[in-house]
Structure formats: structure tokens, C-alpha cells
Image: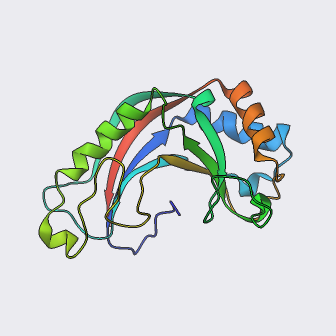
Amino acid sequence: MDEILPNAIGLWALLFLCENDRIRIREFFACDLDIDRRFILREMHISVYHAQREMPGVASIVEPVRIILPAAETRFMTFAPGGFEPTPEIIPGEKKVGIRVHGKSAALPAILALRKRLLAHESAEMLGERFPSTMRKSAFGRRSFEPHMALLRAGSGITSDLRAVGAAFRQKLGELVFDRFEIRIR
């Protein structure tokens, strides 16, 4: 869902988790949950904005930021239709798994501020018949915008009890620090 395809045309605005927290998350999955390291993603980020075409006036950038997301304000999810809530027909160990940012998170205004920077560049030409994006709705891809971050590839074998995993994750990790904002254009 959030993987960047090398030959795809478009724009991605990405908020990257700091190196130290990526290591802590990798250790949590590998050591505490015995997940094979090859299923743990390396480039952990929140896709703040995505457009399936170029945006005039927007250039590739890399800039430092500091956004702190309390792990207590995250919830685990399966990256599948209906994956926000556990259901018997969705097996997390077979799908991509990650976290979403709680709707009342203290970090949400900072994340949405980064998104807002891109919304101003949507033009009628690039949108075509689509409605413009808003802070919570997307013109491209999934209709609603809810910040989320993939952590595990499909096939990880993680337990189906993501609530227990989430509780252990929140207790162990405390705070997550995002330290880089990038706009990538392909």
C-alpha cells in the first residue's frame, strides 16, 4: 500500500520514523514476537500525501522535522479492506500489518500541517474529474486519509490477536519520533 514503485508516475510526501525507533521496532518484532526479520519493513514512514501525477510548483525535498507520536496513540491494523477491526476472515499473519494514528493523537495536527502544504498545489488540470483532497479525504487512492505506517510485510505469521500485540508495542516503545519529511517525485 505504501511501497514506492520505482517506475510509477506521481508524488509521495513521506514522514519518516527516526533510525533509533526503526531499530527499536525491529527488535520488538524479532525478539519479543519472534517474527523473522525479513518480514519487518526497513523504511518505516507515514504517507502524508500521494498523487498519481505530477504537481506543478512542487519539488522534491528532504527536510528535518521533529514530530513525536506517543505509541499510546496508535492502534494496530491489517492492511486489507476492513482491517481496522479484527474479523475472522482477515488473518493478520497473511497480510501487511502496521499501525494507524489515533484520531485524537497529539501528533495529528503536525502530520496534517505537512499534508496541508500539498493540498494547495492540487489543480483542476491534475484532478480531472476528481474532487480535491481535504485534510481527511484524498483525491487519489483510498478516499479517506488516516495516517498509518506499515511495519510488517505480508506472510509474517504474526498472531491474529493484534490487540495484545498493540498493548505490548505501546508499553515497550513509549514514544515514536519522526525526524524527516520528504517529497519524492517520480
Q: Is residue 105 left or right of residue 119?
A: right
On screen, residue 183 above or below 95 = above
Q: Is residue 103 left or right of residue 89?
A: left
The residue closer to the viewer here, 101 or 36, is 101
* Percent coordinates x, y for residue 39 in the rendering: 73, 57
Residue 62 in sight from this viewpoint: no
On screen, residue 71 above or below 26 = above
Residue 55 image-quadrant placement: bottom left
Residue 31 image-quadrant placement: top right
* Percent coordinates x, y for residue 103 in the rendering: 49, 37
Residue at image location 26% in from the left, 53% down from the top: 60
* Percent coordinates x, y for residue 32 in the rendering: 84, 37
* Percent coordinates x, y for residue 7 in the rendering: 40, 75
On screen, residue 146 above or below 94 = above
Residue 75 in sight from this viewpoint: yes
Q: Is residue 56 left or right of residue 103?
A: left
On screen, residue 14 above or below 126 = above
Residue at image location 23% in from the left, 51% down from the top: 119
The residue closer to the viewer here, 42 or 15, is 15
Residue at image location 76% in from the left, 41% down from the top: 163
Q: How many discs mark residues in the rendered view?
A: 0
Quadrant into which the C terminus falls: bottom left
